Image (tube, rainbow, N blue to C red):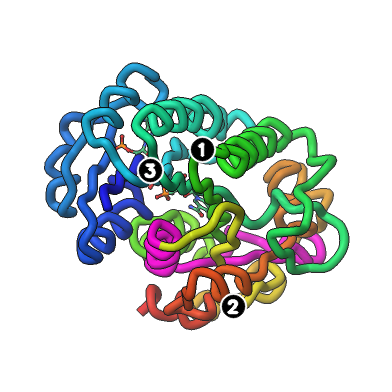
Amino acid sequence: MKVLVAGATGALGTQLVPRLVAGGHEVFGMTRSASKRDVVRALGATPLVADALDPDAVARAVGEAGPDVIVHELTALSDVDLRHFDRSFALTNRLRTEGTDHLLSAGRAVGVRRFVIQSFAGWPFARSGGPVKSEDDPLDPAPPQAMRRTLDAIRYLEDAVVHADWTEGIVLRYGGFYGPGTSLDADSEYLEQIRRRRFPVVGDGAGVWSFVHVEDAADATVAAVQRGRRGIYNIVDDEPARVADWLPAVAGTLGAKPPHRVPRVLGRLLAGEAAAVMMTEARGASNAKAKRELGWQPGHPSWREGFAEIAA
Ligand SMILES: NC(=O)c1ccc[n+]([C@@H]2O[C@H](COP(=O)([O-])OP(=O)(O)OC[C@H]3O[C@@H](n4cnc5c(N)ncnc54)[C@H](OP(=O)(O)O)[C@@H]3O)[C@@H](O)[C@H]2O)c1
């Protein structure tokens, strides 16, 4: 099949493109920068230069490639300031709304058969009920003020893709990425903060996080490109974990002392409402549907071994 990957140069894209090429697909990789054409070529794909927020450029790129499948892996996060969550996500939210619309309408014009888009399994879930959510569980009906616009953008992209009746619209709710090129890579700032005990457990640390190694996320995306059915899939590992459990365990793996603990009220003051919510109220996700319907198994079933691998 012809597959167009928007976001081919990102952490996920650079894992995904070579896997699709190895699977026998003809791959087109979209980037904003002409200077990254060689990066895309080195991955085995044909480069397409287009700004995902420019509808004419997107229509030209999609028209040129004529893909059977479009994969949207766009994001624009460099420095996330959790104290200003929605502001940090503003451009990413445009990629999730306008960027999705432009790719959908360009894809519709060329008769794209499948449209695969990223979403997130974690804080967007309703903060009530059990600790681990399936694809049928609701998103947060009353998100904290600080995260409202970002959740609106996630909701928008999920609805737009699942309800596009002219194509097989597939939403992949990835867990938190770790591994090469991600913000939880061996030499990343976040792991350095854990090593230096500057990443405390906030409150009771009862927030549940689901992780996924970026290579496993790429494998799941290939499976979705090849045999996904309309709907939502959680792409997470087998072990959702409370912050109070995973953070000390990862610190231990990194050879660091256990993290400090700060009361929720102080954590909220220092790191903002979004951080406090993620640390104390977030829910994790089940990967049962992805395993069952995509025939996917994470190569790193638990973040425990996964982080040990990158720390080594
Ligand atoms: N990291 C996580 O834990 C996590 C969890 C769940 C979901 N996700 C989602 O998974 C997807 C992949 O994440 P990632 O970590 O691979 O992201 P990343 O490394 O930040 O890569 C982002 C990609 O988006 C492209 N891009 C940004 N703005 C663009 C624009 N205006 N026009 C065209 N391309 C643009 C970049 O291409 P150029 O720079 O080459 O233009 C790059 O290839 C994202 O959508 C992210 O939101 C991530």
Looking at numbered disc 2 in the image, what kind of residue is underneath it? Asp
Looking at numbered disc 1 in the image, what kind of residue is underneath it? Trp
Q: Is residue 199 magenta?
A: yes
Secondary structure type for disc 2: loop
Select label 2 or label 3 by which is in front.
3
Q: Is residue 166 left or right of residue 72?
A: right
CB within 8 Å, label 1 to label 3: no
Q: Compare marks 2 and 3 and give the one earlier in the sequence.
A: 3
Residue span colored magenta: 197-226
Q: Compare marks 2 and 1 and give the one earlier in the sequence.
A: 1
Q: Where is residue 77 in the image (x, y as percent from the top left)?
A: 46, 39
Q: How far apart are marks 2 and 3 (CA)?
A: 28 Å
Q: Distance between the residues labelled 2 and 1?
A: 33 Å
Q: Compare marks 1 and 3 and give the one earlier in the sequence.
A: 3
- In this view of the protein, which residue sits in the foreground, 187 or 51? 51
Select label 2 or label 1 by which is in front.
1
Quadrant where the image shows the C terminus: bottom left
Q: Quadrant of residue 176?
A: bottom right
The residue lying at 46 percent from left, 78 percent from top is 300
Mark seen at residue 70: 3
The residue lying at 48 percent from left, 75 percent from top is 295
CB within 8 Å, label 2 to label 3: no
Mark seen at residue 166: 1
Q: Residues within 10 Å of mark 2 (few under 14, many from 20)?
A: some
The residue lying at 68 percent from left, 76 percent from top is 245
Q: Is residue 269 magenta?
A: no
Looking at numbered disc 3 in the image, what kind of residue is underneath it? Ile
- In this view of the protein, which residue sits in the foreground, 166 or 145? 166
Q: Where is residue 36 in the image (x, y as percent from the top left)?
A: 19, 38
Mark seen at residue 238: 2
